Amino acid sequence: MRAMRDIEMDNPHRRVVLLLDMDCFYAQCESIRLGLDQKIPLALIQWRSALAVNYPAREFGIKRGDSFEDIREKSQGRCVCIHLPVTLVDQTNHSSVAEPVSPQKDVGAFDPASLVDSYNAEFNQPKEVRERMYKSEKNKMRHQSEGKANLNRYRLASARIFRLIDETLRRLLGRGGYVLERASIDELFIDVTPFCYGNGADLKVGEGPDRASPTKEKERAEIAAFRSAFERDPYKAMEETNVCHSQDVDTNEKEVGRALRLGCHISLAVRQAVFQELSFTLSAGISTSKLVSKLASSHGKPAGQAVVFPGAIVKLLAETKIPKARLLGGKLGKRVAAMLPDCEDTLGSIARFLSLDALTKTLGEESGRWVFDACRGIDHEEVRSTENVLPKSITAFKSFQKVCYPELTKWTTLLARDIMGRVEADTARHSRIPKSITVGYTMQPGGSWIAKTVRLPFPKEKDFDTRVQRLVDGTRKVLTERGQQSFIRIGFSAIDFVPRPRVGIDSFFTQGKDKGKGTSSRSTTRLVSDRLKKSHGIECFFNKSPTLPEQRKKALPPETNITRDQCDSNPVVNEIEKINEKFANSRSADEEIAKQLQESLDRKCAAAGDRDEALALELQSRYDREHEVLSQVERHAAKRKISSSGKKTKRSRKLDFFIKK
């Protein structure tokens, strides 16, 4: 990859970047879930307003934001309206179905290992079930006061599609042949430069000690077959690809052109795999940078793909409005547009009228340089892998016309249950917990919006309902203390994630499906018993102590001629034997005490049912036993201490220990 970056610095167009976009994603999810033909006009509604509109519905002039009444009027009743799922304020999860026909419970809490099963349960129901759902949900509207929008269904579909794309790329290109970056819930960038410009020798295929295994050989053979299919017919994918400004480019260009054609071959294979497996259609843009591939994708919609060769970039940018360009749709784009003459509003206008000095003077060195390069089709931004990148926050919010306490309590409870459930699912998937949670709220005193936030410690109670109530009570306390009366928006955001401890009071999420019941596959008694076996308590103290003969051998200096009979008849040695006999007796007594303590501990553990309390009791009992043993050792050592008024050598002290002089 480093070699590829070095080459790209010499030639900014020597990259192959794909942008895959799921067509009308939210509306397409509902069409597939309900088993509808993709040609049927459909609009996804949220609170009587269009959230997503598919392409057949757009032919009637329907656009996002249209009201339910306008949609019905424009389409003369031919456009199907489906309301997105709603989590009711009474804490029941409602999926817009009056009958219990949908198997969905909480798709936001799916386990990655069961992702396919969760997807199939939501999107691949039998025909008769789909028909009942469609009949129940068609043109049924909901009111904002009923609850909050639930997007878990679409998160599930997105995760399934992304996994399938990644599996397809790994199968066809190898792990080192691509970099995948998730840009949004329905959009991703793929850099396939290593595969398109490499010969396959540098790809991470079949590495490791099992390189010669049949599985690895099969993987290498499949990758080679995919590349060979392109070599046999390098223009086959171009038949299904829109070449932007084809009259101005040479698609037969030896190196860059070949690499982009291979990129089209890859894009087509991925799109076909997703459609065949999941029935979702994707649009794709292929070019030499993230900026241009994003623009190219709009020329491939719907359900198609488009490529922009380097020779067509200038023409494409000359007709592209500034807000349409990636990263120029906000404040930065408005500042640049304000610098241009009237009636000039394209990326090509920036290249013609604004110099590098003018841009850096107004926008700053970094932003000015980026805009100067972007309007010429140069974008050095890398496609960064998001494989192990986790979200920094988990958020749930709700907007209102106006709400006050005590009515606000039911909404904070709803939001708290939602955020706790999603955090618990995240903890199960990624073994992390949030340290803090922010409460964000918006007020509208005197007609002007005021947004504020306050940070609270994330509740750590084990019981799910207790955590919810702690958050609800904490929110009410801080809001009332601040004197806030009415709100138009409120939400929670879990932040500051840290790895979850394996044991201890901080590991407050259970692994079972039952929330707040403290269920576990191992009993607390068994857990304590296993830990005691590994402990370094009284048994370890005696087992690791040397035996009496070994003590004698170590204590006897090699240069002394004392016989073993002399040693056995020595009164001091006899005293040592008596002490060890006392140790043996005390060991039996301590073992009996330890057994009694263990039985008592097991009874307390069974009654308490608390892993942390059991661990504390275990540590305390271990400390008591070891303290008693060490106290006896100190007492015996004090009795053996020989008082002497004269100074003796080290050797003399050793002899005095065994021989009574």
Image: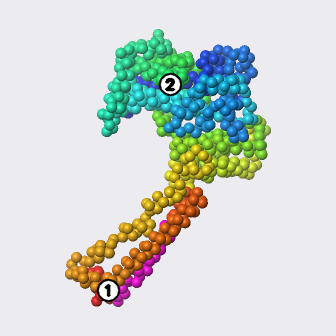
Could you say whether the residue bearing mark 1 is in a helix, strand or loop?
helix
Look at 46% across and 30% down and name the residue there.
166
Could you say whether the residue bearing mark 2 is in a helix, strand or loop?
helix
Q: Indicate which disc residue 277 carries.
A: 2
Would you say residue 482 is visible in this rendering? no
Magenta segment: does it hold 629? yes
Q: Amino acid at mark 2?
A: Glu
The local crowd at label 1, few if under 14, some if 14 to 19, many if 20 or more residues have their Cα within 10 Å, is: some
User: Going by the image, does 557 lie left or right of 22?
Assistant: left
Residue 610, compared with residue 200, is above or below; it is below
User: Going by the image, does 569 lie left or right of 486?
Assistant: left
User: Going by the image, does 284 lie left or right of 197?
Assistant: right
Would you say residue 230 is visible in this rendering? yes
Circle nearer the N terminus (1, 2): 2
Look at 29% across and 87% down and name the residue there.
660
Question: Residue 173: where, in percent of width, then height?
Answer: 40, 27
Query: Closer to the camera, 528 or 490?
Result: 528
**Quadrant location, the N terminus:** top left
Q: Amino acid at mark 1?
A: Pro
Magenta segment: does it hold 150? no
Number of residue marks: 2
Look at 60% across and 32% down and name the residue there.
153
Residue 527, compared with residue 436, is above or below; it is below
Q: Indicate which disc residue 571 carries.
A: 1
Question: Residue 323: where, in percent of width, then height?
Answer: 59, 24
| Colouring chosen for the image of the structure | rainbow
Question: Residue 590: where, in percent of width, then height?
Answer: 46, 72
**Quadrant location, the C terminus:** bottom left
Q: Which residues are magenta?
A: 621-645
Question: Residue 512: where, in percent of width, then height?
Answer: 56, 46
Mark-to-mark CA distance, 1 and 2 = 89 Å
Magenta region's main secondary structure? helix
